[in-house]
């Protein structure tokens, strides 16, 4: 286990609750990128797989928590995405 890995995950994880709270409060998701969130989620999933296969320790919980928050934020993006105009 690396304390630096844990600190990195905590630092990255601080932003997700703020983003989720803003989306819930304003119901506006303008400026968010679903591709960015999906790539970040894939990164957290890769970290979880690495922990499961090679280096299992408690830090896997931080990966899982962060990935869950990204998934919630991504879900809110699609929930509050304004409908597209049709011609």
Image: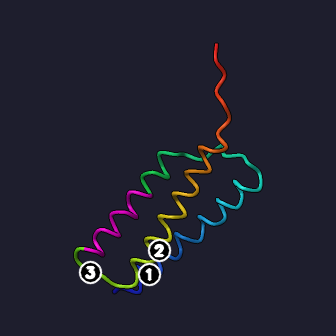
Residue found at the far left of this picture: 54
Whichever of labels 1 and 3 marks the residue nearer the N terminus, that label is 1
- At mark 3, the secondary structure is loop
Q: Which residue is mark 3?
A: 55
Q: Which residue is mark 2?
A: 9
Q: Residue at x 50, y 68 (%)?
A: 66
The stretch in magenta equals: 41-52
Specify the label residue 6 is tagged with: 1
Callout 3 touching callout 2 (CB < 8 Å): no
Residue found at the far right of this picture: 26
Q: Is residue 74 left or right of residue 64?
A: right
Name the spot of residue 54 as percent of width and height, x first. 22, 77
Q: Dot 2, crowdedness within 10 Å: few (<14), some or many (≥20)? A: some
Please state which of the two labelled residues, at mark 3 or mark 2, is closer to the viewer: 3
Whichever of labels 3 and 2 marks the residue nearer the N terminus, that label is 2
Q: Residue at x 44, y 78 (%)?
A: 61
Q: Is residue 67 left or right of residue 26?
A: left
- At mark 1, the secondary structure is helix
Name the spot of residue 80 as percent of width and height, x first. 67, 43
Name the spot of residue 79 as percent of width and height, x first. 63, 45
Distance between mark 2 and mark 1 Cα atoms: 5 Å
Q: Is residue 25 left or right of residue 87?
A: right
Location of residue 83 (image quadrant):
top right
Callout 2 touching callout 1 (CB < 8 Å): yes
Q: Indicate yes or no whether the magenta region holds residue 29.
A: no
Location of residue 19 (image quadrant):
bottom right
């Amino acid at each position: 286990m690396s304390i630096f890995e844990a600190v990195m995950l905590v630092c990255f994880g601080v932003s997700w609750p703020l983003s989720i709270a803003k989306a819930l409060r304003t119901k506006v998701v303008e400026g968010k990128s679903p591709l960015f969130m999906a790539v970040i989620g894939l990164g957290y999933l890769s970290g979880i797989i690495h922990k499961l296969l090679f280096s299992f320790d408690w830090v896997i919980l931080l990966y899982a928590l962060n990935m869950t928050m990204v998934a919630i934020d991504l879900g809110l993006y699609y929930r509050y995405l304004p409908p597209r105009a049709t011609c």
